[in-house]
Image: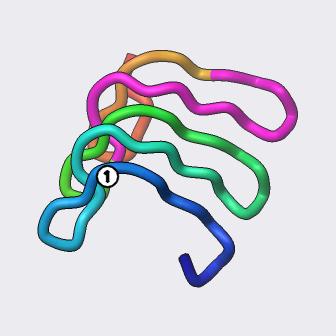
Amino acid sequence: MQNGDIYQGDWSEGEKNGSGHYEFANNDLYEGYWLNGKRNGKGVYRWNNGETYNGDWKNDRMNG
């Protein structure tokens, strides 16, 4: 990706869709499900400071 982010996972019609692993340039990490390029469904977000959110996502936002 242009900004140093790395995505490995499923794509559909040019968007992240399905299961994927996304490593941000700042070393944050998201592993979970995507829908139309946004985090949706179950996923785990790990901030580079060690904090973790493990739960639901909707339209790229924590939901639960």
**Which residue position is annotated with label 1?**
38
Q: Is residue 36 above or below residue 60?
A: below
Can you tell which quarter of the image residue 16 is in?
bottom left
**Residue 10 belongs to magenta span:** no
Please give the name of the residue rendered at 37% of the width and 46% of the height, measured from the top-left corner.
60
Q: Is residue 64 above or below residue 47?
A: above
Q: Residues within 10 Å of mark 1 (few under 14, many from 20)?
A: some
Q: Which residues are magenta?
A: 39-52
- Which of 27 and 7 lies nearest the eye of the viewer? 7
Percent from the top left, x then y, of residue 59?
28, 45
**Residue 46 belongs to magenta span:** yes
From the image, give the main secondary structure of the stretch colored magenta: strand
Please give the name of the residue rendered at 72% of the width and 63% of the height, measured from the top-left corner.
25
Tally of numbered discs: 1
Can you tell which quarter of the image residue 33 is in?
top left
Please give the name of the residue rendered at 64% of the width and 42% of the height, measured from the top-left corner.
29
Mark 1 residue element: strand
- Which of 27 and 12 lies nearest the eye of the viewer? 12
Q: Residue flagged by tag 1: what amino acid is it? A: Lys
Spot the residue most to the left. 13
Q: Is residue 8 left or right of residue 34?
A: right
Percent from the top left, x then y, of residue 7?
50, 58
